[in-house]
Image (tube, helix red, strand yellow):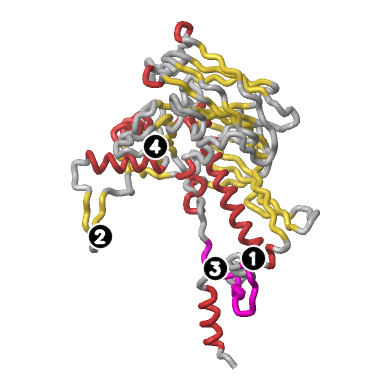
Amino acid sequence: MISSQNLAALMADLNKGTVGYQTPLVPAGGSQTASNLSPLIPQQLSQTLSVATSSMADLKLWPMLNKVAAMNTVVEYNRVLSHGAEHSPFIAEGGVGALNRATYQKVAVQIKYLAERREITDVASFVSLVGPSADALALETTRGTEALLRRVEKELFFGNSSVNPLAWDGIIKQISDAGNVADLRGKAVTPNYLQEVLGSLYSAPFYGMASHILVTPRVLSEIIKQTVTFGRHDQVNFSNGMLGFGSNNITISAPYGMIPVVACPFLERHDRIAPAAGASGVFDGSVVTPTISVQPTAAANAASQFVTADEGAYRYRVVPVGPSGVGVAVDTNAVSVEAGDRVSFTIAQSDASATVSHYRVYRSAADAASADGALLVREIANGGATTVFTDDNADLPGSSPILLINSGADHMAYYQMLSLIRRPLAQINSSYPFLLMMFGAPAVMLPSKMWIIKNAGVNPAQGLPA
């Protein structure tokens, strides 16, 4: 009898080769003989799972938000806009001061509904996916949860109900609507610039005290690079036998304290790069090739922000999006743009039965041969049979926003009607379908005490494309 140790060693030797259910029974020579048969190889799975996408550690804004229970589909709260007018406080002897009143505003937040649909087959529930214990449902629930929260985080930043009626308004739109917006026009942000914004925000009439500066990882790397290149102190440190160059713990001094700069991976939109032309997601909704018109320089609109450095031929890629998925991407022809021009084109649906809520419009680099790799310009709402899109270069592809926020419970919150749950769906075949659901909406109670910096760029001094 062979011992268990020897048997284990034999199986280990067999497993060093091809990993799979079994190797071919017919050898390379084509003849199947008793002395030339390939051995059976059992399926070998590692105890760890290699994940080639985001993880829970990449969520930054979602953990910051204070979760408040919502008992109705509409949540109302009052906002104090002013304590009163700036009257003179002085009165004459025996007189009476001018009547003064505070100004209040009632704000309503509508709860929105989010879901992630998943399924596993009955066979998958019996197969060991990771290690010796087979739990495909738990594993797929974990993957679905991470996928849903990744998009929740993105929508917390970029959601816009005027573009997608099913969406909430993210914090960028809520703060922008209050008017606190600065525009870098593609220039790299500097610590000095952030200090100026923090000082302005703390001054009258805002009285805002930001608790965090939220940036993309690329922008934080730009700030780190500047601290190393232009810092007045030695940026190379030696500790415990390790040599460190620069620092990732960047704080910016404000008039009231030090404000941390936080890298938010999902502030860099996952859908910022155009999908392949003709590729479709879940549903087959598509659009016909858009008709382009260019407003020439002679009749330029004052809103145009195309300058001499932007001149060139551009191609646009239009992608329809709806509750059922992403439709077929369609490209425009190349359009030559000069300083002062505005590009305008009409998007017409070719499939009236498809449910299209909005469009993502991408723009190529100047004089690019195709729209492959084009970057997101803007999302626009579906205007019906035809939708007109106008590009005046207000939103620069490849740039990113910077948010100066106060995450305190009295400044912003997430109204939660339903925390994340898993709901089984009806089985109509040999698979187990289920939904991951959550109901809620973000609210910025004091947007005037926060700030948005748009179109922040980076300086690719080392040759890496921006």
Q: Residues within 10 Å of mark 2 (few under 14, many from 20)?
A: few
Q: Secondary structure at mark 3?
A: loop
Q: Is residue 278 left or right of residue 408?
A: right
Inter-mark Cα distance, 3 to 1: 25 Å
Inter-mark Cα distance, 4 to 1: 47 Å
Give the mark nearer the N terminus: 3 vs 1: 3
Taking the view exactly as shown, the residue that stands out farthest to the bottom is 1
**x then y, percent, for residue 291:** 60, 18
For residue 242, the mark is 2
Q: Nearer the viewer's eye, disc 4 or disc 3?
A: 3
Q: Main secondary structure of the magenta part?
A: loop
Q: Amino acid at mark 4?
A: Met
Q: Which residues are magenta?
A: 30-49
> Is residue 48 shown in magenta?
yes
For residue 18, the mark is 3
Question: Does residue 419 lie above or below 156 as drawn?
Answer: below
Q: Amino acid at mark 3?
A: Thr
Taking the view exactly as shown, the residue that stands out farthest to the top is 298
Q: Mark 1 — residue? A: 135
Query: Who's the residue at 45% across and 6% down the image?
Result: 298
Q: Secondary structure at mark 4?
A: loop
